C-alpha cells in the first residue's frame, strides 16, 4: 500500500525528468531571490540557464553548515518574511543555531513525506502514535506529528522523558507506534524490564520509528527484542525539513530517500568527487520543492552509501544505507579515524553487558570505554570480570585499530539520556 | 545437603560503596556472618555470608545492583598446625584448583571457606578424608 502511489513508484526516467524540471525551477528562484546564491553564482560565472541536465548539478555551489550560521537569522529566505509559516532551529552545539523557515506549502510537503513513510512501514489510520521526540524548536516531533495526523493516527504528543508517564500513556491509550531516539529506546527497554512490564503481554506496541541519532543493526535488534516491536530506521535533518527525508519500508533494507523532493549525491569528503556507485561518502542534498528556504547541495556531514538495486516494495526511489557516522562525530585517536558507532557495534554484540556506554578520551590520547555490566555477565568472580574487560578491549582493537581501556561499571552509573545521548566525553589535554 | 551460599555483589571501587551495600542488607534485617571484598582497579566484588542469601540477592537486585549467588564449601578443620595444608594437599592430589579461599576461627572452631570449580567432587573427596563439610544451617549457627 502507498500514500502517494504515483510519485512513489514513478519510473526512473519520469522521476529524473521531474527532478530536472524542479531543479531548474529551484535554481531560477534562488538566483532571483537569495543574494547569497546570487553572489555564489556570479563568483562561478554561472547563470540558471547553464543547468540543462541533472549532470549539471555538479556545477552548482555547495551550501554548508557555516553558510547557514553566517546567514542567520533570515538571510537565505526565498519568500517574503511575512509568507513564512513556521520556524524551526537546528540543535547547534556551539554558538547560534541554524534557523529554518517553512512556508505553508513546505509544512504540508514535510507532512506528506512523513505520511508516505508511515504507510510504507505498515502504519494505518487508526494506529495510536505516541511521539516521544522533543517538541519545540526541534523538527523531530512536530514534522512527524503532522504526518501521522495526515495518515489518520491518533497522535499523543508525549515528548521525551518521564518514562513512568510514557508507560502509563501506552497502557491507557493503547499506543501501537512510537517515535523516539535509539538511546531513549534502549533506556526504555531497561526501564520496562526493571518495572516488570512485559511489552508483548502488557502493551500493544507494534512499531517504532527510531532516528535522530545514528545507530547500528545490533542496536536495532536489542530495541526490537526489549520493546517487542519492529524498528524502522528513519533519516532526516532540520536543514531538509527534519524527519522523513529517508525512511525504511516494511522490507527494512535501507531507507527510501524521496527523490522527487531531494536530489542526492554521495561525495568523497576529501575530493568532493562522487564516489563509485554503492560506496560510502558524504551525503549531499539539494531541495527540489522547498519554497521558503531552498538549499543547493547542502553538505550534511553524514556518511552513508546509496543502494541502487530495486526494492521489493515497488518504490522506485533509491535507498540510503544506515548512516555509519556523522563526519562531525568522528574521533581521531592516535591518528586513527573512529566513529562511535563502530564501538557500539562491538559492545552490542557482546553478551553479559548492558545497553548504556560512554567513550571517554583522556590524558594525552587515551580512550576508556565504560560499559554497564549486566547480571548475565556476572559470575561473582573478579577474574571473570577482568577477562571480560580484556576480551572487549581485544574486540574493540580489532574494530578500531587502537586498544582502549574497557571499564565495567554498575548499571545506572553512566549518565542516562532521555533525548539525544552524549556518548563521547573528550577530556584530552592535547 | 544444603550447600553454603554466598551473595556476591558487583560494585565500584570508591568510598561509600560498602556502606551502601551493607545498608541495604541491614534494612532487609539480614545478619552478616562473614564477608570478603576483592577489588581490582575501578571495581570490586563483595561476597557475604548472610542468614538468608536469597533474600539478600533480591534486596540488592531491587536496588539495581548486579548480584549473584555462589555455592561454596565450608570445611571444619582442627585448630592446629598443618590443618590447612592437609586440605590443600588432598585437593591438589585430585587436581582440584582452589579459586578463592579464606579462613577464620570462631568459638575454637577453625573454618575454611573454599571456592572451587568442581564443588561436588571436592566435597566428596574432602568427606572421604573425614573432613567435616558444614551444611548451611551448621555454618549459620557457629
Image (cartoon, helix red, strand yellow):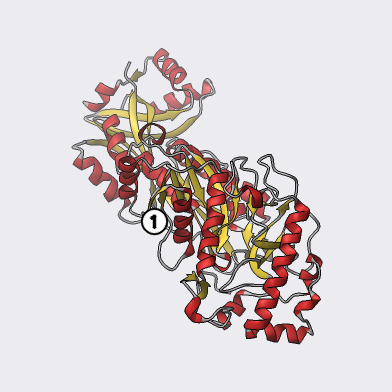
What residue is at 48 percent from the left and 25 percent from the top?
B89
**Residue that extends furthest to the top in the rendered view of this protein:** B128
Q: Residue at x 54, y 23 (%)?
A: B95
Q: Answer with left or right where residue A159 lies relative to residue A123.
A: left
The residue that label 1 is drawn on is A160
Task: Name the residue nearer the viewer: A63 or A199.
Answer: A63
Q: Residues within 10 Å of mark 1 (few under 14, many from 20)?
A: many
**Element assignment for label 1:** loop
User: Which quadrant of the view contains residue A328?
Assistant: bottom right
**Quarter of the figure that contains the C terminus of chain A:** bottom right
Q: Chain of mark 1?
A: A
Q: Looking at this view, is A183 or A399 the one in front?
A: A183
Q: How many marks?
A: 1
- Say left or right for A295 vs B70: right
In the displayed structure, A301 sits above or below A184; it is below
What x and y, as percent, mark residue A183? 47, 52
- The N terminus of chain A lies in quadrant: top right
Left or right: A52 as drawn, with respect to A398? right
**Residue A85 vertical position relative to residue A43 in the rendered view, above or below:** above
Find residue B112 and report its image quarter.
top left
Q: Is residue B81 visible?
A: no
The correct choice, above or below, for B76 with respect to A342 in the image is above
Q: Please state if A227 lies on the left or on the right of A236 as rendered.
A: left
Residue B15 image position (x, y, % from top left): 33, 56
Q: Position of residue A314 (x, y in %)?
A: 68, 42
Q: Residue A337: x, y in percent?
A: 67, 62
Residue B137 visible, this angle: yes
Front one among A116 and A391: A116
Amino acid at each position: 500500500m502507498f500514500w502517494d502511489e504515483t510519485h512513489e513508484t514513478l519510473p526512473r526516467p519520469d522521476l529524473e525528468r521531474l527532478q530536472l524540471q524542479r531543479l531548474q525551477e529551484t535554481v531560477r528562484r534562488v538566483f532571483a531571490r537569495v543574494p547569497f546564491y546570487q553572489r555564489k553564482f556570479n563568483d562561478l560565472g554561472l547563470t540558471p540557464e547553464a543547468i540543462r541536465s541533472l549532470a549539471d548539478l555538479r556545477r552548482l555551489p555547495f551550501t554548508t553548515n557555516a553558510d547557514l550560521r553566517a546567514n542567520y537569522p533570515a538571510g537565505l529566505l526565498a519568500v517574503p518574511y511575512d509568507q513564512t509559516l513556521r520556524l524551526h532551529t537546528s540543535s547547534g552545539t556551539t554558538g547560534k543555531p541554524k534557523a529554518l523557515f517553512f512556508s505553508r506549502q513546505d509544512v504540508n510537503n514535510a507532512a506528506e513525506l512523513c505520511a508516505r513513510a508511515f504507510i510504507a512501514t505498515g502504519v494505518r489510520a487508526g494506529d495510536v502514535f505516541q511521539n516521544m521526540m522533543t517538541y519545540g524548536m526541534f523538527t523531530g516531533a512536530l514534522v512527524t506529528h503532522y504526518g501521522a495526523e495526515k495518515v489518520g493516527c491518533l497522535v499523543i504528543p508525549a515528548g521525551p522523558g518521564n518514562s513512568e508517564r510514557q508507560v502509563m500513556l501506552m497502557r491507557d491509550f493503547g499506543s501501537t507506534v512510537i517515535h523516539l531516539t535509539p538511546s531513549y529506546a534502549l533506556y526504555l527497554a531497561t526501564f520496562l524490564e526493571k518495572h516488570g512490564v512485559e511489552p508483548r503481554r502488557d502493551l500493544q506496541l507494534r512499531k517504532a520509528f527510531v532516528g535522530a541519532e545514528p545507530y547500528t543493526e545490533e542496536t536495532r535488534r536489542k530495541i526490537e527484542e526489549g520493546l517487542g516491536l519492529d524498528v524502522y530506521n528513519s533519516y532526516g535533518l532540520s536543514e531538509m525539513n527534519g524527519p522523513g527525508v529517508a525512511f525504511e519500508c516494511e522490507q527494512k533494507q535501507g531507507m527510501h530517500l524521496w527523490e522527487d523532493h531531494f536530489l542526492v549525491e554521495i561525495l568523497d569528503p576529501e575530493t568532493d568527487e562522487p564516489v563509485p556507485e554503492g560506496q560510502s561518502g558524504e551525503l549531499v542534498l539539494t531541495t527540489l520543492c522547498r519554497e521558503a528556504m531552498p538549499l543547493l547541495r547542502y553538505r550534511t556531514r553524514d556518511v552513508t552509501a546509496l543502494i541502487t538495486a530495486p526494492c521489493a516494495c515497488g518504490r522506485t526511489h533509491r535507498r540510503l544505507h544506515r548512516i555509519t557516522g556523522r563526519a562531525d562525530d568522528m574521533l581521531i585517536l592516535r591518528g586513527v579515524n573512529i566513529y562511535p558507532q563502530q564501538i557500539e557495534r562491538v559492545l552490542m554484540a557482546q553478551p553479559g553487558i548492558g545497553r548504556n556506554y560512554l567513550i571517554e578520551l583522556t590524558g594525552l590520547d587515551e580512550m576508556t570505554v565504560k560499559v554497564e555490566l549486566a547480571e548475565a555477565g556476572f559470575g561473582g568472580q573478579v577474574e571473570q570480570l577482568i577477562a571480560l574487560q580484556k576480551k572487549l578491549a581485544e574486540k574493540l582493537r580489532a574494530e578500531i585499530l587502537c586498544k582502549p581501556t574497557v571499564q565495567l561499571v554498575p548499571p545506572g552509573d553512566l549518565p542516562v539520556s532521555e533525548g539525544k545521548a552524549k556518548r563521547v566525553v573528550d577530556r584530552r589535554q592535547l | 545437603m544444603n550447600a553454603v551460599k554466598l551473595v556476591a555483589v558487583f560494585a565500584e571501587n570508591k568510598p561509600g560503596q560498602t556502606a551502601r551495600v551493607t545498608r541495604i542488607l541491614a534494612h532487609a534485617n539480614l545478619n552478616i556472618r562473614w564477608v570478603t571484598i576483592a577489588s581490582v582497579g575501578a571495581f570490586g566484588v563483595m561476597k557475604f555470608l548472610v542468614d538468608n542469601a536469597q533474600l539478600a540477592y533480591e534486596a540488592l537486585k531491587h536496588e539495581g545492583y548486579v548480584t549473584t549467588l555462589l555455592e561454596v564449601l565450608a570445611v571444619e578443620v582442627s585448630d592446629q598446625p598443618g590443618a590447612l595444608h592437609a586440605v590443600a594437599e588432598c585437593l591438589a592430589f585430585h587436581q582440584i584448583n582452589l579459586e578463592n579461599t579464606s579462613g577464620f576461627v570462631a568459638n575454637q572452631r577453625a573454618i575454611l571457606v573454599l571456592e572451587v570449580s568442581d564443588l561436588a567432587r571436592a566435597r566428596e573427596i574432602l568427606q572421604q578424608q573425614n573432613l567435616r563439610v558444614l551444611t548451611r544451617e551448621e555454618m549459620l549457627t557457629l
